[in-house]
Image (tube, rainbow, N blue to C red):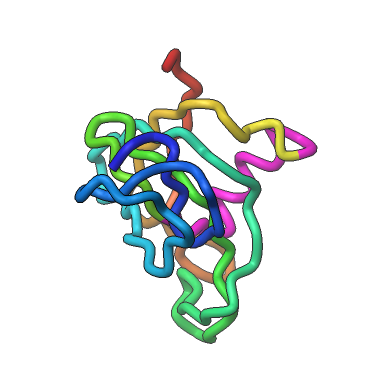
Amino acid sequence: MNSKQIKGKSTGSGTTASGRKVVRQVTASVIKFEIDEPRVVRIEDAMRVSTRKVRDDDKRKMGPATICTATDMETGEQGVIVCNKVFSGNLSEAYPGDTYIGKVFEVTKRAKKKGAHFDYSPFDIVEVEA
């Protein structure tokens, strides 16, 4: 997949693996973060609320997911990051006004920690050169 393809969005740019022009990408893979395995991603658009529901980290309720489109810089794969509250909070605080868009980050999910009301997964998020 080339860097001009954006999954889940209507686009007139980009091509498929067979060389055809992309009109609209209907499906999107999920870029998932595994514990203690860093991934380098470029955030392609602003975090937004999805129409699909996912479980919160505390597994007590289902709610709409906060997502953003990203590119895995090592594989070139584009997909969707499901942004939990810790991940989205860290990015929003450090980059107000969605200024994280277009930036490249090394993201490492850490083992769950006990919080006052529920367990949560902390993240190490470091902006790196592209």
Residue interval drawn in magenta: 80-97
The answer to if 120 sits in the magenta stretch is no
Q: Main secondary structure of the magenta part?
A: helix
> Who's the residue at 46% across and 49% down the image?
6
Q: Quadrant of the C terminus?
A: top left
**x, y percent for residue 111:** 31, 51
> Who's the residue at 26% across and 45% down the image?
19
Q: Nearer the viewer, residue 20 or 67?
A: 20
**Quick check: 19 left or right of 121?**
left
Q: Quadrant of the N terminus?
A: top left
**x, y percent for residue 117:** 58, 71
The image quadrant that residue 124 belongs to is top left
**x, y percent for residue 44:** 54, 40
In this view, 108 is above or below 33: above
In this view, 55 is above or below 31: below
> Who's the residue at 52% across and 80% down the image?
52
Q: Nearer the viewer, residue 80 or 109?
A: 80
**Quick check: 30 left or right of 103?**
left
The image quadrant that residue 27 belongs to is bottom left
> Who's the residue at 53% across and 49% down the image?
12
